[in-house]
Image (cartoon, grey):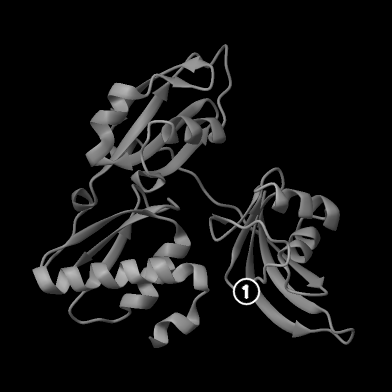
């Protein structure tokens, strides 16, 4: 199928899933709600469905600024509202005076409940306040079973979406030049770190491309890719502005630390 040529091989399985959702909506003439999707998966949904007159789509993750969102695919007659995305907001209660909880600990505790990552949206942290978003269908299960994060005893309280912590993303533009489009080369320049140190991060599963772990330093990056390295931050490839006279790639990136 022609659409596959525009995507990496590892994304073909998800494309098949989107095509299946599309056909389900057409066949049943009813809406289809997905799990939470990362931004790359959202891009794929947009690309695959495009301007299909029989199937419309929209995304919502609890607020306009959230990264992970549920997709709603629906026939033309349907008018979606926020309630149709079935998203629950939880606030974590914990002894903040005596313990510090990090993002990784929250995600680890949620995943230890035996639920898929797709059942959880963003984890939001500001000062000592911690919130996370989840699919309504697992909300009661979370309330009953989430009692600890790391070594801290916790409880969770369901909140209206209007109480969500409001976060803003700050990206700093930068221009780098690299000898190749390899993952290790780009991360090394973006974060001013040695190639060896970046390669070690990659080999140890600490690097993601488009929210998926990549453990090969020679992985070739493309325009639009979002790269993250634990302990360094995140960057996105905004544009590839051709090559210099010394045959090096000139790349415009955004850096978030």
Q: Is residue 33 above or below residue 62?
A: below
Q: Callout 1: 10 Å neighbours few (<14), some, many (20+)? A: some
Query: In the depicted view, which residue is nearer to us: 6 or 65?
Result: 6
The spot of residue 255 in percent (x, y) is: 67, 57
Report the number of discs. 1
Q: Quadrant of residue 57?
A: bottom left
Q: Say whether residue 62 is visible.
A: yes
User: Mark 1 = which residue?
Assistant: 222
Answer with left or right where residue 223 lies relative to residue 23.
Answer: right
| Quadrant where the N terminus is found in the figure | bottom left
In the rendered image of this protein, does residue 246 appear above or below residue 202? below
Residue 35: x and y in percent read: 31, 52
Is there any visible trace of residue 194 in the rendered image? Answer: no
Query: Where is residue 196 drawn, in percent x and y?
Result: 85, 54
Is 230 left or right of 134, judged from the image as shown? right
Residue drawn 77% across the image and 55% down it:
199
Which residue ends up furthest to the right in the rendered image? 246
Classify residue 89 as left or right of residue 228. Answer: left
| Residue toward you, 157 or 222 | 222
Q: Is residue 147 above or below residue 108?
A: above
| Residue 95 percent location from the top left of the image | 49, 13
Q: What SS does tag 1 mark?
A: loop
């Amino acid at each position: 199928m022609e659409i596959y040529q525009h995507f990496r091989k590892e994304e073909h399985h998800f494309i098949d899933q989107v095509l299946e959702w599309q056909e389900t909506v057409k066949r049943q003439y009813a809406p289809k709600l997905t799990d939470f999707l990362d931004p790359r998966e959202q891009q794929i949904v947009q690309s695959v469905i495009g301007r299909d007159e029989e199937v419309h789509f929209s995304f919502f993750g609890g607020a306009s600024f959230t990264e992970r969102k549920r997709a709603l695919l629906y026939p033309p007659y349907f008018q979606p509202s926020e309630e149709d995305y079935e998203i629950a907001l939880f606030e974590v209660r914990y002894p903040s005076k005596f313990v510090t909880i990090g993002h990784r600990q929250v995600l680890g505790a949620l995943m230890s409940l035996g639920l898929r990552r797709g059942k959880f949206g963003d984890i939001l942290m500001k000062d000592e306040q911690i919130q996370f978003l989840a699919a309504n269908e697992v909300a009661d299960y979370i309330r009953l079973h989430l009692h600890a994060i790391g070594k801290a005893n916790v409880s969770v309280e369901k909140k209206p979406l209007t109480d969500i912590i409001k976060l803003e993303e700050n990206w700093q533009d930068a221009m780098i030049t690299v000898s190749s489009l390899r993952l290790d080369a780009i991360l090394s320049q973006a974060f001013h770190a040695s190639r060896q140190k970046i390669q070690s991060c990659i080999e140890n599963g600490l690097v993601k491309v488009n929210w998926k772990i990549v453990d090969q330093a020679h992985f070739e990056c493309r325009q639009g890719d979002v790269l993250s390295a634990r302990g360094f931050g995140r960057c996105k490839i905004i544009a590839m502005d051709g090559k210099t006279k010394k045959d090096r790639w000139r790349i415009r990136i955004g850096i978030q630390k």
